[in-house]
Amino acid sequence: MQDNDESYYLYQQTFNLEGQLIQRRSVLGLLEIHAFEDQIILPHENTMEAPKKDRYNLLEATQANISPIFCMCNDEKGDLFQLLENYSQAQPTFRTNDVTETQHDLWKINDVQIIQKINELVENKKFIILDGHHRYTTALNYKNNNSNKKNQYILTALVPDSEPGLKILPIHRMLTSEYTIEGALTILEKDFEINRLNQDKITVNSAYDAFKDNNSQHGFLLTDNKQFYTCMMKQETFDQLAPQSFEMNLDTFIVDEIGIKKMLKEKNIDYLPEQNVNFVTSFDEMTSMFNQGSNNLCFLVKPLPIQTIVRFTEKNMVMPHKTTYLYPKIGSGFVVNKF
């Protein structure tokens, strides 16, 4: 359905996470594209070249934004969150459920006063890209190569940072190599305080719960699905490296640089080698890989606080590839921006 009048869309996702029913609201609209050096649109993760080429070809072929990028803005007083929550009390324009049983609700916002209020609430804000770095970079390149006015904007789902349904989940690393867990610990013990978890009927789930609830230091949980060890960075090592690298505040950086790359003797590479490392987000996926019988070790990290993302973008820094997993993903195709 072609929409000719000026409007936003309220987009709500209702999903189950660890037995809790959660709602997350965002506003769908067009965001003006700016170069990163303008300090208006802020990335938080590194990108890779191959996905950008694929997305450029798709953009050129479709002449449309089919899948919105996902951005966050500051909402210190909670005004934008409150506006979206109030608007969601009405009957949605559109509702559907996907295969993951996530419910998607859409409300058209064409009230001039509400549109103006949204504009005022986001005026002069900085926008942090949470998901869609490759799509945004592609749109920026496409804009620079094509002078059409319609190419100056990108379809965006904008969430206020006050939204309690905004969930950032960890991305764990599954390493396939020659190392047994004992061999890995021999390498890691120089930089990490290592303790074995001893519980009756221990599982990945129960070990991870114990790890993330009881450790305030930086580090990770290491397992071969039989044994479970907490590996927390030694304070003297952290104190030595932290002044040299702000990334030491990220457990994924610690795993990648001081754990996996050191084990593989690959210190001078930008990305973890695909032939050795898989990125996993669910325990089911993890268990399936362990059951395949390969020589696998999993490095599990804690969830990343939203404020850490903000701190990195404020310093004009980006995080390692595959640091954050936004759950659930923003749905594609509900609203399309046709050039």
Image (tube, rainbow, N blue to C red):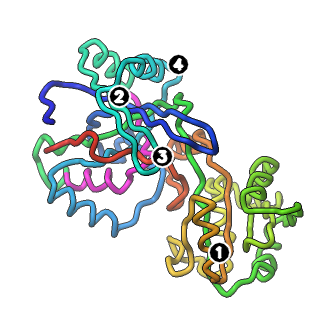
Which residue is pictured at 44% across the width and 36% down the height?
Answer: 13
**Residue 136 drawn in magenta:** yes
Q: How many marks?
A: 4
Q: Are marks 1 and 4 in contact (CB under 8 Å)?
A: no
* Picture quadrant where residue 158 is located: top left
First of labels 1, 3 by sequence position:
1
Residue 239 visible in the picture: no
Check disc 4 and report the residue beneath it.
Answer: 77
Q: Residues within 10 Å of mark 3 (few under 14, many from 20)?
A: some
- Nearer the N terminus, badge 3 or badge 4? 4
How far apart are the alpha carbons under marks 2 and 4?
19 Å
Residue behind mark 1? 290
Q: Are marks 3 and 4 in contact (CB under 8 Å)?
A: no
Which span is picked out in magenta?
124-142
Q: Quadrant of the N terminus?
A: top left
Q: Which numbered mark, 1 or 4, is in the foreground of this view?
A: 1
Image-quadrant location for residue 206: bottom right
Distance, label 1 to label 4, CA atoms, is: 46 Å
Disc 1 residue type (three-letter): Phe
Name the residue: 37% across, 18% down: 90
Query: Label 2 belongs to which residue?
Result: 10
The Cα–Cα distance between marks 1 and 3, rounded to whole angstroms, is 25 Å
Question: On screen, 329 above or below 57?
Answer: above
